[in-house]
Image (cartoon, rainbow, N blue to C red):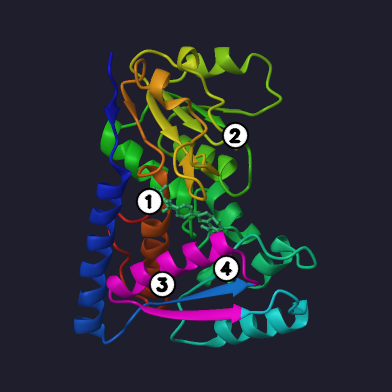
Amino acid sequence: MVAQIIDGKAFAAKVRGQVAQHVSALKAQHNQTPGLAVVLVGEDPASEVYVAAKHKATVETGMTSFEHKLPADVSEADLFALIDQLNADPDVHGILCQFPVPEHLSERRVVARIDPAKDVDGLSVVNAGLLASGEAGLVPCTPLGCLMLLRDQVGDLTGKDAVVVGRSNLFGKPMAQLLLRDNCTVTVAHSRSNDLPGICKRADILVAAVGRAQMVQGDWIKPGATVIDVGITRVPHPEKPGKSRLIGDVDFGPASEVAGAITPVPGGVGPMTIACLLANTLTAACRAHGLAEPQGLTA
Ligand SMILES: Nc1nc(=O)c2c([nH]1)NC[C@@H]1CN(c3ccc(C(=O)N[C@@H](CCC(=O)O)C(=O)O)cc3)C=[N+]21
């Protein structure tokens, strides 16, 4: 079997188009423009690239982008003062602090400082709790993007055996909650699970977020399964010196001979993350103004 390649880039463009339509209606009918503030601490080159991509996508969908760059040695007090100011700003509906932050800061404390209603990363304890309780909060962008791809690819997920490899607060746990909400039978496996290949092999839906390049082998995959690869490891380019390329957590070549459908890296989950950040910002703006939430752009 040769797997269908799931085009995350094209799907993300479609989602961004839907967001843009809602944004223009919001402006025309309610004179409101959703705003996203991105905070970058320090000068990590990879983070600079991501933040620039987020800024571009935000502006392209008609939303306002606020960028705040702080020096790597900024104190927690000064960072919190900025977050407090953004929390209080009615033009800012979403706040994201790019990770990783420098060693002397705590990601957990930074996220806790952001108003949960503006936490468009969906990483706060409040939003994690709302998701676990089946209530409306803001859902982390990468799991939300994977859910959208899965619903589009598979249709109704009810009764499917889903295996999530990885148990992070950022991805694995919220992904498992979303799959459970869509009536999958969910297994959360991780690097210390016994018989990881055997667990994966049971999955109709396999979501790999182990954080180890090409760890999931072709013979770990049930024939016909839908495979979502969340890994992004940057490695030196094999042919072009000085350049890098991205590889996923799945050994793509062999896996694509067994799976029914599979996301590539790059061009799979990554672009969906940014599209869902925009969707979350729109959702937060609609809620802030007491308006109906956009259909199809939330979990
Ligand atoms: N507070 C916070 N929220 C985040 O959501 C967050 C973060 N910090 N820190 C870093 C990670 C990483 N991340 C990605 C977003 C888009 C792509 C993406 O679009 N990737 C493209 C390729 C991009 C390339 O070629 O470099 C793809 O996979 O096709 C990847 C990774 C968001 N992150």
- Sooner in the amino-acid sequence: mark 3 or mark 4: 3
Bounds of the magenta segment: 42-69
From the viewer's perspective, tell me whether residue 213 is left or right of residue 263: right
Q: Position of residue 298 (x, y in %)?
A: 37, 55
Inspect this view and state whether residue 155 appears: no
- Sooner in the amino-acid sequence: mark 2 or mark 1: 2
In the rendered structure, which amino acid carries the disc numbered 4?
Answer: Pro
Label placed on residue 210: 2
Local packing at callout 4 (Cα closer than 10 Å; few below 14, some 14-19, many 20+) is many
In the rendered structure, which amino acid carries the disc numbered 3?
Answer: His
> Which mark lies nearer to you, 3 or 1?
3
Q: Which residue is mark 4?
A: 116
Q: CA distance from mark 2 to mark 4?
A: 27 Å
| Number of marks in the rendered image | 4
Identified at 45% across, 44% down, the residue is 240
Q: Which residue is mark 3?
A: 55
Q: CA distance from mark 3 to mark 4?
A: 21 Å
Identified at 56% across, 12% down, the residue is 198
